Image (cartoon, grey):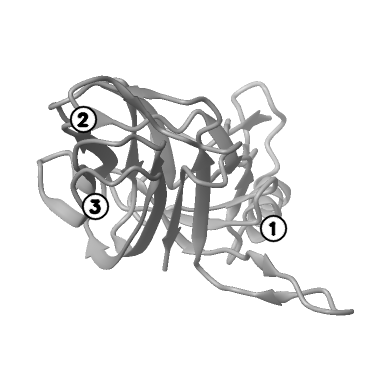
Amino acid sequence: MGATTRFGLRWPELTDAPNGPAQVQQLAQDSDGWLCRAYRCTSSTRPTGVPDDFLIRESDTGNLYIWTGSAWSQVAGSVSSGGGGGGGTPAIGTVSATYAATNAQPIATGVDVVVAFGVASTTSSEVTRSTFGAGHQFTLTQTRLWIISATLRFAQNPSGGRTFELRTGSGTVLAKESGPQNQDAPYTAALSIARALPANTTVHAIARHNAGTSLALEPSSGAWVHIDIAGI
């Protein structure tokens, strides 16, 4: 008997003894086991060459996806939110990712510098990190309502102004905050947006100052320099 490579559906070959009813029954039983089921795989072994509307369920994440013809779009998933004594409440279809900085990144004076977030605290296949300039950018692989917040901090310095921005790869400023001039103190900004963004939008954070000399970010082990991304 021959068999398909993906689902293992068997069919009679020329070398098999003729037995139409039994062989058709075998094919029907093989097919019956897959009807109304999503194809099981893992997040790293998604099938290729599938038709539109093909459904998969990842055994390692529990997420359900559908193939749109060009990309895998999440249909449902679950993220447990903690609670006292219970098992948490599932949030259907949400994704989240958190990245932080632990090194004091130097920022040259008078130029826009992309902030680096070198440590992954929480990751999601729907949010991918890549190097961009001196830092990192994040690609949002699905069309969703995206909530993005970033805490960013310059170390203490007596001169110059400070600015932080959230930008898209096309240069659109999503959020911006600037500090006072010539204030001899650390400067911390909290940027946040909630916006519907199309799939494959890239987002990054920018740091800028005019202190006249290099000025470092002050991450405090990630507590003061981090970015949090959630998709609904």
For label 1, count other residues whose C-alpha is less than 10 Å away and answer few (under 14), some (14-19) or many (20+).
Answer: few
In the displayed structure, 227 sits above or below 87; it is: above
Q: Say what amino acid the circle numbered 1 marks.
A: Gly
Q: Between 196 and 171, which is closer to the camera in this rendering?
A: 171
Question: Is residue 43 among the parts visible in the rendering?
Answer: no
Q: Amino acid at mark 2?
A: Ala
- Residue 134, image x and y in percent? 30, 20
Task: Specify the farthest residue to the left.
Answer: 171
The residue under label 3 is 179
Q: Which residue is mark 2?
A: 211
- Who comes first in sequence, dot 1 or dot 3? 1
- 225 to 5, vertically: above or below: below
**First in sequence: mark 3 or mark 2?**
3
Q: Residue at x 47, y 35 (%)?
A: 218
Q: Earlier in the sequence, mark 1 or mark 2?
A: 1
x%, y% of residue 55?
49, 55
In the image, residue 103 lies at what x, y percent?
A: 52, 25
Of the pair 10 and 155, the residue shown nearer to us? 155
Q: Is residue 10 visible?
A: yes
Image quarter in which the C terminus is found: bottom left
- The answer for how far apart the CA atoms under marks 1 and 2 are is 68 Å
| Alpha-carbon span between mark 3 and mark 2 | 12 Å
Q: Residue at x 65, y 50 (%)?
A: 61
**Residue drawn at the location 58% of the way across and 56% of the way down:** 63
Tell me residue 120's x, y (percent). Answer: 56, 36
In the image, which is nearer the foreground, mark 1 or mark 3?
3
Q: What residue would you read off at disc 1?
A: 33
How far apart are labels 1 and 3 at the CA level? 63 Å
The answer to whether 173 appears left or right of 88 in the picture is left
Q: Secondary structure at mark 1?
A: loop
Q: Which residue is at a point 29% across and 41% down the rendered structure image?
A: 205
Judge left or right: residue 222 versus residue 68: right
